[in-house]
Amino acid sequence: MQDVEPIVARALAEFAAAPDPASLENAKARFLGKSGELTALLKTLGKLAPEARRSAGAAINAAKERLEQALERRRAELASARLEARLAEEALDVTLPGRGRGRGGVHPISRTWARIERIFGSIGFDVADGPELETDWYNFTALNNPENHPARSMQDTFYVDLKDPGGLPLVLRTHTSPMQVRYARMHRPPLKVIAPGRTYRVDSDATHSPMFHQVEGLWIDEDVSFADLKGVFADFMRRFFESDDIEVRFRPSYFPFTEPSAEIDMKFDSGPLKGRWLEISGAGQVHPAVVRNFGLDPERYIGFAFGAGLERLTMLRYGIDDLRLFFDGDLRFLRQFA
Ligand code: DAH
């Protein structure tokens, strides 16, 4: 019979040289598999004389055992080498400095929004919220807007391809004033509410944006006067700007839903627009026709309303000269408020 030693020597060499588990198992098959070299040798035993068969059989079995042990060892070696490699590859260097995470900040308009809610909340105003997609009736008609008012034109207003139950197209609300009517029709007087929110107009320049924010204010009771409007608004301004000497003027104006009407301007006292007046709010005594649309008797109920621009207030507070900066999403600008 063929000598087993050279076969064992070759097998051991191949096992040791196998670079990965698959090659090792292939090498195993070549020696110990069904048609492996050692198995083939075992099959020749039958041809030997009993005496020689016993010793050859013992030699082959001993060789098989050695190979199996060597195989086990090599398997373990390859497995731990693989583990080492993975550990090295996925190593985490905990001593490296952290990459850091950008801290979010509150947008300047949101800051203004929150300040306004806080200030008016402290003097007993409720805060209301309503739809940005408005019906023609709430946005215009209920507010005494005449049929031919320019705000109703396509050039000034975004109309939507959806109709209200009366067949009129819905509009993106052009002001927060419809909230006066919505709130009044759902509450009993005295009505004392602000309604901040998004508004829309076909308008775009340094002081106008197609989407902007307003806060509506409404105070209706049996004896709320224009003097109350001046008092409440001036107090709000002083607290909003944290200053007692701000320059504000009430300029006579016209709105269909107020009589008398005023526009409230404020002077920039710093920044690139120093000395310039900026309109921040419309205001007035609510028109009797509107009070009637509130579902109230205008002979009994009277009061004021205002609608102020949040962007304008924010520009004045921080001395910002271009309102578009609020919506550009430029972090160099926004970070200054974080
Ligand atoms: N809605 C008006 C606008 O957007 C602003 C306004 C004026 C609101 C007078 C009022 C008001 O409540 O009384 O131009």
Image: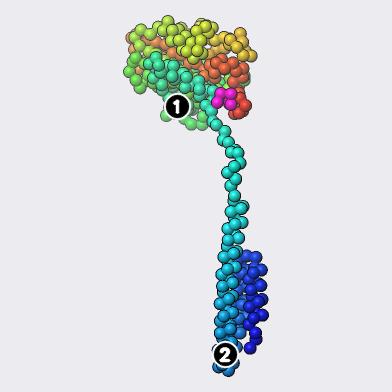
Question: Which mark is drawn over residue 131?
Answer: 1
Q: Quadrant of the C terminus?
A: top right
| Spatial CA span between label 2 and label 1 | 99 Å
- In the depicted structure, whether residue 169 falls above or below residue 21: above
- In the depicted structure, whether residue 137 falls above or below residue 76: above
- In the depicted structure, whether residue 228 falls above or below residue 49: above
Q: Main secondary structure of the magenta part?
A: helix
Circles 2, 1 touching at the beta carbon (< 8 Å): no
In the picture, residue 167 is in which quadrant? Answer: top left
Question: Which mark is drawn over residue 69?
Answer: none
SS under mark 2? helix
* x and y percentages locating residue 28 in the rendered image: 60, 74
- Of residues 217 and 254, the one nearer the viewer is 217
Q: Is mark 2 within 8 Å of ligand 1?
A: no
Q: Which segment did they paint magenta?
A: 334-338
Q: Is residue 37 left or right of residue 249?
A: right
Callout 2 environment at 10 Å: few (<14), some (14 to 19), or many (20+)?
some
* x and y percentages locating residue 29 in the rendered image: 60, 75
Residue drawn at (40%, 16%), measured in percent from left and top? 122
Residue drawn at (45%, 27%), measured in percent from left and top? 131
- In the depicted structure, whether residue 76 falls above or below residue 100: below
Which residue has dot 2 on it?
53
